Image (spheres, rainbow, N blue to C red):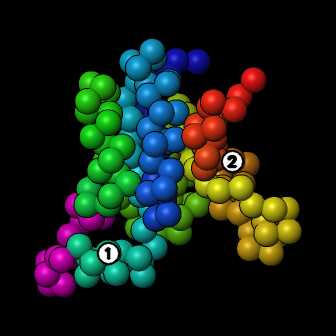
Amino acid sequence: MALETLVVAVGPNDNTRTDELTEAVLDVAIPTDSSVVLLHAFDERAYEKGIEEAGFDPDESPSANELAERLEGIDIISEALDAADVPCEIRGEIGAEGDTILQTTEAVGGDLLYISGRKRSPTGKAVFGSISHRIMMNSSCPVLFVREGVYSDDENVE
């Protein structure tokens, strides 16, 4: 299987995981000469709030792509990809997070999907559900889950 398109789902809380995501993406993108799609899925409420927080005129109604381009996590990863000469596209989509990530990954021909998150107990997953788990079980391509803190403990690895 050739890896041509890597999709990175950058969530609203991924600002603390941008280093891990960037390192994981570069580890694959550079040797495979893949292009990267940075994706942020907005639900309607988050999209409306984002317009206000980003300082857009409410009458302008920017596209979801324009709003995604202003997200800190997307910006940090995009700059690192540019510095490494990895082609990158930024996409914003509006819809339910899990379904939108799956649909967009398939639409762009994603060969590998990156998602991230924090460690959660089995009880937490049962009570609150897990979008990440649903994505992993329903994706049309392999999914790489980048857990917060994995790359920061490199010196403790034996």
What's the residue at 26%, 56% (across, down)? 69
Neighbourhood count class around disc 1 (C-alpha, 10 Å): few under 14, some 14–19, many 20 upward: some
Q: Which residues are drawn in magenta? A: 55-67
* The C terminus sits in image quarter: top right
Tell which of 45 and 151 is nearer to you: 151
Q: Position of residue 63 (x, y in %)?
A: 24, 65
Q: Position of residue 17 (x, y in %)?
A: 50, 50
Q: Where is residue 20 in the image (x, y as percent from the top left)?
A: 52, 41
Q: Contact (CB < 8 A) between labels 2 and 1?
A: no
Report how far apart the C-alphas of labels 2 and 1 lie in the structure.
27 Å
- Residue identifier under label 2: 136
Picture layout, residue 121 above or below residue 52: above
Q: Earlier in the sequence, mark 2 or mark 1?
A: 1
- Residue identifier under label 1: 50
What's the residue at 60%, 50% (across, down)? 148
What's the residue at 57%, 40% (across, down)? 152
Confirm whether the magenta stretch covers residue 101: no
Q: Report whether 99 appears left or right of 94.
A: right
* The N terminus sits in image quarter: top right
SS state under label 2? helix
SS state under label 1? helix
Amino acid identity at mark 1: Gly
Confirm whether the magenta stretch covers residue 64: yes
Q: Residue furthest top?
A: 31
Picture layout, residue 97 above or below residue 34: below
Tell me if I can see residue 109 in this picture. no
Q: Which image quadrant for residue 124?
A: bottom right
Amino acid identity at mark 2: Met
